Structure formats: structure tokens, C-alpha cells
Amino acid sequence: MTTLWDTTGTEVVKALSAERRTGGAMTSGCALTLIVVVSERDVPEAEAAATTAASHHPCRLLIVVRREVDAPVPRLDAEVLIGGRLGPGEAVVLRMYGRLALHAESVTLPLLAPDVPVVTWWHGEPPELIAYDPLGVFADRRITDCARAPDPVVALRQRAEDYAPGDTDLTWTRITPWRSQLASAVDSSASEITGGSVSGPADSPSSKLLAGWLSSRLGQRIPVHSNGNGALAEATLTTAGDGALQLRRGTDGHAQLDRGEHGAGSNTVPMPDRSYGELLAEELHRLDDDQPYADALGAATGIAGLNDRVDDRVHIWRDPATQNTEEPASS
């Protein structure tokens, strides 16, 4: 590992090249560049998640820590690692102080692995507009997490209003087991689905996305019934002839799938809580546009035509020192 204090982007590039020569790493083995935007307090959690994801997807990992944006003197500290605590690949941790933190792309762009896709993940409150952050503008895929916003439901709607192909959110990834089990149950059912509902917290974006996904797939509105402040608990699909398919989550990492039609009975299926690393690794499996997510997001928020939008963001400069007094200008 090479540690650089009060350095420059050029010196970081040189240090990465030197580490690669001594460590024998090959950039040709990188499937993508993963940029992680995180605050200092969440760095250990983000590093653990990124390390897990990198073990599944060889990548160059760039962790951008924006610290003390209001510091009077810009400064860059960096750690350059190959085959260290952040996995077997190449990793750079960039801590930026002062105005440099507002121009993170000036340091990050020269560090991108050549000729591979770029994925940006915000491990923290998602940006109001991705166009405010150049690290999102030049990325091919953008991963947010509405669950980390002060108001997750408002954040989910903002993701729909700001959506462009290539966006996704970890609240969508969290319901993958639910979607898999329900899709399998519907495929094996001989009866027509006539309605349904989702039971979960009123402020849960995952509950709303699951209902939105069912609505978009079934062509009819599937409501969310609040169950207080618990977790996403149940999904019920009614079938012709007063039958029902019901998936209920338990407390032991499993769920009960009931097929209340023609004596089909019930069975226990796995429904474990997954770590950030597992969620991130799943998202890195696909680098194309996630059209089912866009359909579900549109149905959940009532905003249509998300898949028809153009992935063409232009960076909008926003200065935290003046944003309350001036309108941001496009650049």
C-alpha cells in the first residue's frame, strides 16, 4: 500500500502505476470501474461492501470521501492498494478536503480503468439530482439507496422524476427474493390473477416498489397496506375462483409461500437479509438498463414513460456556498 498526504491527482496516477508494476496487476482483468461516494463515518461499511462486490466482479475500485467541503485549503490524501484489504484488484481511497471535494471528477477521471463501464454508487443519502454530481454524469450505471434518505418515500419519487436509463436503487435489489418467489408461483399457477396487495410500512420504498412491480406486470393497481413500522411482511395475489397466492416473511430468514388453490398447499422458501456487499454484487451483474425497475418505479410513483427517456445528463454546477441564493447553472 502507498499512502500519499497532501498530494495531487498526478501523483496518485503515478503511485497506482508503480503499485501495478510491483504487484503484477493487470488492468485488462478489470470488468468495470466502481466509484463509491461515501462520507467518512460510513467508510468501513462501504469498504466492506465494495470488497465483497469486487470479489465477484474484478474491478478498479475508487472510493471518494468528500470531507470538510468548507475547509479553507483544498487538499487530497490518498491510499493506493493492490491486493490489499480491499480485495485482489486495484483500489484507491481518495479523501478530498475543501473546494476539491466539489470537483472530484478532476482526480477521478484519470484513474478510470480503460475501455470498461463505470458504475457509481452513493452509499449515503442519494443526490437530489444526479446531474449535480459529475461522478454520476459520466457513469454508465448509477446506484442509489432511497432507504438512507431522511424521507425514503420522497426520495423514491425524486428518483422517478430524475430517472434516466442506467439508474437503479438498492431498495429494488432488496426485493429480488420476493420477485423471484412470486414470479415462480404465478408461472406455476393455472388460475388467472385477479388482484392483490402488499403489506409493509407506509414509509418503505421497497414495499412501494414491490407493489409497483406487481402492478406493472399484472396490468392492474396493487395497493400497499400499512403494517406500522415493521418490515415488508406479505404479498397476496388473488386468483379466479377465490383462490390466493400468499408470500409471508418470517423472522428466521425464511418465508411461507401458500398456494391456496386446488389443495396445492404451502412450503417454506429462503428469504434471508442480505448485506450491502451482496446487494451491490447483484447490481454489478448487469450493466445494461434495468427496464423492469423503471416500470416498477413508474407504477409506484405514478410517473409514466421512464423507459422512453434518453440517457443524456448534462452536469449542473451547484455551489453549496451559494445554492440558497442563486439558481444552479448548466455547464
Image: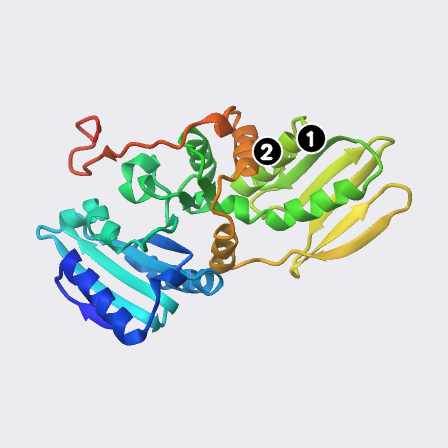
Q: Is residue 208 visible?
A: yes
Q: From this view, report whether residue 16 is shown above or below residue 188.
A: below
Crowd tier of the residue under label 2, counting other residues whose Cα lies within 10 Å: few below 14, some 14–19, many 20 or above = many
Q: Quadrant of the N terminus?
A: bottom left
Task: Give the residue type at disc 2.
Answer: Gly
- Foreground mark, 1 or 2, reads 1
Outermost residue, right side: 262
Q: Position of residue 259 (x, y in %)?
A: 82, 45
Q: Is residue 45 visible?
A: no
Outermost residue, bottom side: 22
The picture quadrant where one finds residue 216 is top right
Give the camera-side residue of 227 and 258: 258
Q: Position of residue 302 (x, y in %)?
A: 53, 25
The picture quadrant where one finds residue 19 is bottom left
Give the camera-side residue of 100 and 72: 100
Q: Position of residue 70 (x, y in %)?
A: 15, 47
Which tag, 1 or 2, sits closer to the chain's start?
A: 2
Crowd tier of the residue under label 1, counting other residues whose Cα lies within 10 Å: few below 14, some 14–19, many 20 or above = some
Q: Which residue is mark 2?
A: 212
Q: CA distance from mark 1 to mark 2?
A: 10 Å
Q: From this view, report whether residue 238 is shown above or below residue 17.
A: above
Query: Residue at image x 50%, y 50%?
Result: 283
Which disc, if any, is residue 23? none
Q: Position of residue 62 (x, y in %)?
A: 31, 57
Q: Quadrant of the C terminus?
A: top left
Task: Give the residue type at disc 1.
Answer: Leu
Query: Residue at image x 44%, y 39%?
Result: 166
Q: From the viewer's perspective, is 5 left or right of 142?
A: left
Which disc, if any, is residue 218? 1
Outermost residue, left side: 73
